[in-house]
Amino acid sequence: MASTLKWILPLQLLWAVACPGRAQVRPEITGLASRIKAIAITSASYPRQNLQLKDSLAITLLQSATVEELLELTGHPSPIIRTTALFALLGCPEKASLELQELVPLHFYDTAEVQIEIWEEYKSNGSAQVGEVFLYTIGGYTNSLFWQNDGYALTETKQMWLDSLFICTPTHFNELKGHLFWKWEPRQPMYPCIRQMVESGQDNQASIFLAKYQREADIELITSHLPTLRGSWGSNTWLPFRFFRHPRLFSFLKNNLDKGWTDRHFQLRLAEYKTGEAAILLDSLYARILQLDKKKRRPAVTTFARALEGNYDSLYAPLYLRILTEHSENANLHVPEGLWLTHADTLYRLSLAWKNGGRAERERSAKMLPEIINYLESFSVDSLNAEIISRIQPGLDMRYYVEHQAEMGATMKAYQHIYRTKAPYFVDPLIEILKKDPLAKNRFFIAKLLHEYNDPVIDERLALLFREAPELARQYAGGGRGRLFFKNFTYHANQK
């Protein structure tokens, strides 16, 4: 394995280091390669593994050339031949032993664009720069589904070497480092290299990597070289703060509230501190949002609430409750689970108000039913029973809530509660619904639910009702959709 000294070698010398005995390509192989005019590869639709050359000339090249010749052709002046040679190497049985990671740095500035025919079930066309193809296939530096499962993977040691070199070397493809730093863990040998990159300003993202070392001595250097977009601060600017939280960095955020307060990542970084000072600063940020005009205010409130929700702490409870109360019509606001631990009574009272509100409020109230059940089981059984009955009014189509999924979910939770508890309180309301419900499948479902009580008195009441209303008896005997629905209902209810 190459030593870390190779990180600082000029790229024009790397080829000699990687391939000390460069092979001579036979004239007939050179002639064959020069006839290749297109790059075509095949892949199964999913998972996309073992990319294969499709063009007949390229396949002939793979079969005719030696491994050494293919390695040499990856440096050919023609971008089509360079890329074809790479795919040929990826198709060699001995590819795992070829040290292919050594080829990647040679193409850190290979920006020639190639068109690639991609043959799956149907043909599609793609394009990429040659250097990107080497980074995608060998290094795995991509989020594209097509390249993620190309059938080639480096050993952990080789991947670590390439990661280190890719991070520490200026390239034309620095944006691809964004696919790497999320999984990259800092290693001590790389620290001097990364710090030097930040100091020199040669890599706009380098301060993100430096922040991962979490060294207080680097704070001033990090904040002096924050990532920018076209010279201006943006969402990436705040990424170093994700990996390093420190009182001095919090002070920097506080002092730059004017520059970052509208940015989602800035808000996330503040909320992650979960301190009293952070809560105060977030209160002031919310006050600024309220000063926006109505058109801008709604999405800004949603973004801000998501930042709090993702980093919820009881310190933020008063602010989050205020947001829920003042913007209850916003369908994108959710109720953090942690808020139920400290403010269940307040949330229950809000749910009662929302139940008769607008569409977003009704749906939020319906989604809260499981937590409401848990709360009322301990504090008010009578209120719980009333809540359950309110969710099972006649005429609710329990199978086809196309536009009201939240209400369907609440209805199912209510019936599941009845099914599990079989509380006598629900018998009379269920019988009344059975008499009035206009939907046959609902009447069958309710009759079956009452029968599940296994109570002779209830069964006798059902029998009397069937004698008085023969059409109910016929529907119960037939079952239809109600029978299938009840079977599915009991299956899911028993899983809880």
Image (cartoon, rainbow, N blue to C red):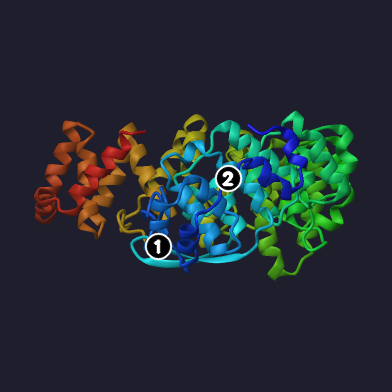
Given the image, on which type of amino acid does mark 1 rest? Answer: Leu
Q: Quadrant of residue 438?
A: bottom left
The image position of residue 173, as x and y in percent, is 68, 55
The image position of residue 479, as x and y in percent, is 14, 50
Asked if residue 162 is positioned above or below residue 143 in the image, the reply reads above
The image position of residue 60, as x and y in percent, is 38, 57
* Marked residue nearer the N-terminal end (1 or 2): 1
Q: How crowded is mark 1: few (under 14 residues within 10 Å), some or many (20 or more)?
A: some
Q: Which residue is drawn at 59% across and 48% down?
A: 141
Q: How far apart are marks 1 and 2 (CA)?
A: 27 Å
Q: Which residue is nearer to you in this view: 157 or 473?
A: 157
Q: Which residue is drawn at 64% across and 41% down?
A: 18
Q: Which residue is nearer to you in this view: 341 or 102?
A: 102
> Which residue lies under the disc numbered 2?
139
Given the image, on which type of amino acid does mark 2 rest? Answer: Gly
Quarter of the N terminus within the rendering: top right
Nearer the observer: mark 1 or 2; the answer is 1
Instruction: Describe residue 322's horizontal placement relative to residue 454 as left or right.
Output: right
Asked if residue 295 is positioned above or below residue 7 in the image, the reply reads below
Instruction: Describe residue 54's horizontal placement relative to residue 287 as left or right.
Output: left
The image position of residue 75, as x and y in percent, is 60, 55
Q: Quadrant of residue 190?
A: top right
Q: Are marks 1 and 2 in contact (CB under 8 Å)?
A: no
Q: Residue at x 70, y 41 (%)?
A: 165
Residue 57: image tag: 1
Q: Which residue is drawn at 38% across and 43% down?
A: 414
